[in-house]
Amino acid sequence: MDDFVRKKLTEWGFSDLIQKFKDEEVDQEALGCLDDHEIEKLISTAGKRIKFKKKLKLFQSQQECQEPAHSAQALPSTSNRSEPVKRKLELRMEENKNQTPNKRQCNTVTGAYEEHRKLGEVKRIMSTLHDRLHHYDRTELNDFLRNQICDLETDKREMVGVFGKTGAGKSSLINAIIGEKHLLPSGSVIACTTVMIQVEANMENQKYEAHIEFITKEEWKDELWSFKNLSGDNGDEDSDNGDEENKSTRDDDEYYDNVEKLTALYGDQWKSKSPENLMEAKYFKDVPEFLQSKKKILSCNLPEELSAKYLKYTRSGSTKENSGEVERCYWPLVKCVTVKVPKNDLLQHVTLVDLPGNGDRNKSRDQMWRRIVGNCSTVWIVAEINRAATETESWEILKSACSLMGNGGECQNIHFICTKTDDIDEDSDADVGRRIFKRNMEAKDKVRQEFNKLKDVKKQFRDDCFTVFTVSAKEFLQKRLLKPEETEIPELQMFLRSLNDQHSETLNYVFGAYGILSLMKAAHCGDAARKTSVCAELMENITCEKEKVRKPMEDAYEGFKKHLHTSVEKSKESCEKALEKMLYRSGKAKCGFHNKLKHAMKNNGIFKPVKKTKKGINMNMTLSSLLSESIDEEFKNAFPNDGNSGPFYGAISDFTLYTEKLSQNYKDVELQLIFLKTEEKKMKAKLCRITRHRKKTIYNSLPETIEETMRECYTRAAEVRGKESLNKMREIIQNHVRASKATMFDLAKDDMLTQLRELMGDILKTLTDTMQRSIELSLKTNDNSIPDVSAEHSKVESYYKELKGPDEETSLLWPDMLDDSLDSPGSAAAAETSDFRFH
């Protein structure tokens, strides 16, 4: 421990922790790299831990800004990703080079460095002011200002979900795009399709790291019990009119999938052991973190070293050459692996996620899969070019997940990426290049034609969301047959740069800081009578603007109500027929159906097959499908995933206090009005984030309400054993639906409408309460007990004007500050991945 850390702990009010930090040898460098796991070990109480993290976050951001600018490999991007980038993605890179640059776009590394320097300077100013405010009297304004400064620090992340079957070239594609040839293993190693791999930047240090998150001990014990008990219970496999419906479990993909899991972890020992024996600590001595419910962190200096280390947590094992012994692997216990790449500009605000195609049968893995898919602003579907248009698995992934990505998510872009375009017979270099180009164009046309056939998928997305890329990761690196731009890898890199949008992050922070400093400077200035007058006008504006927001939302609500009422009656009429079609399969779908239905009953009506091409069971979606289909178009128009139009986002965006107009008449309160302008924009961005999260919950409420109504029936059906168990399960399900249909669909409709009504109320209340409180604090509070910030205000004002440009309208992309708790109605936090623009 050094004097610097001792001084910081004392300054922050944590002098009682000095001895603990000394014992753990936390010096200045270590302090700047502390993560949540390490802080938890150092500080045992939650309240003190939360306060420490706030202080540390400000300190770390200050330290980061003092470092040299990031490498020049990724130039800053345009701040308007929703238009120029998407519109140009299919053009050749030569054409892109000739486009007139956006006014906001920095075209040189020097410009990028200047922005980074200014951001660092403003962050240091605000961090210093935050500390200075602690030495002044605790007043309402003082507390408000300190909270405002903390809220400036945000971490916006865009998620890009990557789907594709094993061998399609996902790993090679990601490696090539982010410039890390050996990061993700590819080739002949057998992939494990249940482990999600997230790839993001390591902004803390220069190490390559893998953060491994495990499922819980209880979940693994349940999996062991289910396999041991259900797979051996062949007495349940009663016949059904002599058909093959109840073919032995040992012929099912699920059986062999479970065998693969157990063999990977236990070798052959699992065959003679009980579930209780298999939970003994000796089997997990190499992964004590699993038993401790903690993350395992691997750290290396080189990407290939890390890849070799985390392989056993993501892939099936290989046989050792000499002994013939199979190496033990731990992927069956893993929920997610986050691979962190040091200081990679393309990943600074972007997370690439290699996703299983249809989720997972493990509950926590599946919940994480659903959450991540719902949070992806972009989805990449990867398939080999030779079979891209006819690749069943790729299209099945899109069809099965479209409601999670579309109305139930926030996906704005679907990129179908045809890989291995260099895989072609070579005659001559010139001829090969011509034939590759010709095949690429044909593949693009065929893929687009296939997508246009997916009417149900298209109902979830806007018309221009779909783009086809034909790429070659191999040629991008080798430059043998194709120029780099002909591989289309640079276009995908350009797209990721547009998501990172460093300029917008800088402008947002500086604009927010400018507003706070304006309020501090004006806190004890201005004429009381003039303040009262402008207050009255602002309050009147709130009343008028609130009604403008309410009206379009109310109209949308009535439209949903009308559509749902009609579909409820249709659902009551057709539900039994739809259910019968699901319960009585024909043809090949009959094989092993008894076991699949049994698993579905244990999992609240849902069975996910191991093979993506095989048909699963989702009884809740089947029963709620008419309700969802009746509002799909309406929902897409009401809550478009671009987040800046429609009766909710658009109405919020149009809300204004007319502060610029008022500032012309009330020059003496111009500083307060500047602050109110920043507050208005920040508040609107926050409301759009809240709306985006809540709309996911609202859309997904239909099948979830059905599931809740059916839960008791599923529990009873899952307990059925012995002869005729299949028919008994069918009978329980059909009788329950017959008895419940009179109320079940009305409950789903009412729950959705109630959530919509609550969202509308929360939006209007937040608009009113937030702006009224800001007006009260800025115009009705005289407080001399705050620092003089005249110098700081002048400097930040000049930076803001330089960054904004003379003719440019401020267009905030306020990054997400909320966490996943926003997925439930009424929450006030969020931490997701998109941004919102207001012009």
Image: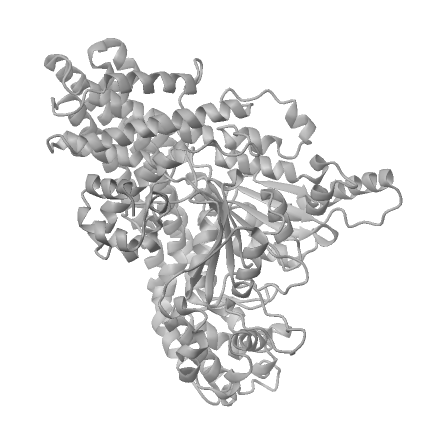
x then y, percent, for residue 152: 31, 33
Task: Provide residue 391's location: percent of width, then percent of height.
Answer: 68, 56
Task: Say which quarter of the image contains residue 684.
Answer: top left
Quadrant (top left/top right/bottom left/bottom right) for the C terminus: top left
Q: Is residue 162 visible in this depiction of the protein?
A: yes
Question: What sort of colour scheme is used for the picture?
Answer: one colour
507 versus 625 height, above or below: above
Along the line of sight, the residue nearer the viewer: 638 or 464: 464
Label count reads 0
* Residue toward you, 271 or 323: 323
Q: Residue at x 40, y 49 (%)?
A: 696
Q: Nearer the viewer, residue 784 or 759?
A: 784
Q: Is residue 632 left or right of residue 697?
A: right
Say left or right for 556 vs 452.
left
Say if 263 sits above or below 621 in the image: below
x%, y% of residue 325? 61, 78
Answer above or below: position of 781 versus 629: above
Q: Position of residue 637 (x, y in %)?
A: 45, 39
Judged from this view, the residue extending furthest toward the front is: 2
- Residue in view at x 88 percent, y 42 percent: 428
- Tell me which residue sits at (19%, 20%) in the image: 788
**Residue 553 visible from this viewpoint:** no
